[in-house]
Structure formats: structure tokens, C-alpha cells
Amino acid sequence: MRGLSSELGGSLSETLREAAAYSRLVVLCSFQKEESVILDELLPLAPHARVVTIDTGVLFDETLATWRAFEQRFGVRVEIEDATGSPPWAGPEHCCGDAKVAALQRALAGADAWITGLRREQGPTRAGTQLVEVDAKRGGIAKLNPLAHWTQRDLWTRIQERDLPYHPLHDAGYESIGCAPCTQPGGGREGRWAGSAKTECGLHS
């Protein structure tokens, strides 16, 4: 298998070196293949970065196992922002539109930059993703998307080259993995809300 192109590897490293200069840096982690690549490259540069996940209370068991694998491999303690709400799960509109967005706001309180796994290839709503953006919704902090130009093939090449942990549901046909009641196997973001036109949970839109 071909190695990762120097251009892609360079853009990842350069963007993460820029990220590392922020003293209050947050990585939003959902334990998918993108975050495995990011954490592997970032944490040696920025051990001060906070890694935060949003727990809706209805994550796959495989997600919880991947969470443990990430902590063990990367030597990091993942912080939790609770988005379970009351009742614990009341359908995707409540979870996505209210609880998760509020949890993200708490996670980013006091931060001056955050890192995401957004990629242009993921769908039309992400086609314009830039490596570095200004997050106007959150006080103008920096939003860094170091994998913006990467493809699925690029990610799997890096994961195999470095033997990185990854979510086992990717091997079962799940390309994008969210909450267990909503997510189905399938390509692109459409598998996250099967039978719906929904492609974003509100965190990035």
C-alpha cells in the first residue's frame, strides 16, 4: 500500500503545531478513526491539550471500548461532558439540537482553540472546511480541522502504518458513528440518522 503523501502529512503536522501554541486547547473526540490519527500526532506536541467527549448516555458498547483503548494507547484521560439530559434519551432532535450543543459550549468555556476531525469528503455541509477557521459562534476562538483535505484512504493508510486503535464498527460498515439508537451502517454522514435528511447534529452547523 502506498504511504501517505508528504503534502497531507505536512498539512496535518503544520496545523497541529499551530494548535499546540494555544495554551487552552480542546480536542473534541468521538472515538472515530479521525480522532485516532489526530491524537497520535497531537499529544507529543501538545500534552497540555484537553481531550473531551460528549456522552449522550446511549453510546455503543464498542464506543466505550474504543474510549478505553484510546486512553491506554495515547496516555490521556478523556474528560466527559454530560449530554444525557432528562429523560436520558428523548430522540435525536432533543439530543442533537439541545443537549449536545450545550455540552459543547461547556467543554469550550475558557478555551482559545479547539480541534475537530472534520473532513471535506464527509459531505456537502463540510465541503468548504478549512484547516484553520474562526468560530464566530463561540466568541471567535480558533477552530482547527487538520484533516480537512484527507480522504478515507488516507486515514486508513495512517492507521495501518502506525497500528493505531480504531472503532470496530468501522469494520462493520459504519462510516460515521454516533448514538446507538440513531446510527446505521452506511457511507457518509447519512448513516448517522437513517431514514432522515439530517446530516449534522448541530455542533458544526
Image (spheres, grey):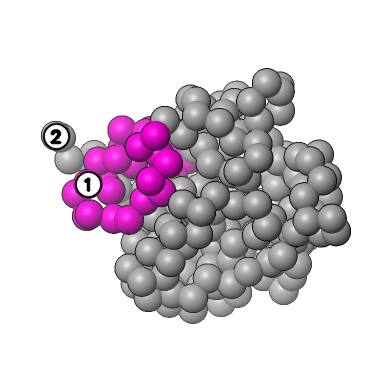
Residue at the image point whose x is 59% and y is 26% from the top: 190
> Which span is picked out in magenta?
144-172
Q: Is residue 127 visible?
A: no
Residue that sits furthest to the left in the current view: 1
> Considering the numbered disc 1 on the image, is that residue within a helix, a strand or a loop?
helix
What's under tag 2, amino acid-wise?
Met
Q: Which residue is mark 1?
A: 160
On screen, residue 49 above or below 56:
below
> In the picture provided, is 105 more to the left or to the right than 127?
right
Image x and y of residue 171, in percent: 35, 37
On screen, residue 22 above or below 129:
below
On screen, residue 67 above or below 2:
below
Question: Local crowd at mark 1 within 10 Å, few (<14), some, or many (≥20)?
Answer: few
Question: Local crowd at mark 2 within 10 Å, few (<14), some, or many (≥20)?
Answer: few
Q: CA distance from mark 1 to mark 2?
A: 10 Å
Residue at the image point whose x is 48% and y is 25% from the top: 187
Image x and y of residue 185, in percent: 50, 29
What's under tag 1, amino acid-wise?
Gln
Q: Are marks 1 and 2 in contact (CB under 8 Å)?
A: yes
> In the picture provided, is 59 more to the left or to the right than 137?
left
Image x and y of residue 131, in percent: 50, 46
> Considering the numbered disc 2 on the image, is that residue within a helix, a strand or a loop?
loop
Q: Which residue is mark 2?
A: 1
Answer whether residue 131 is magenta in the image. no
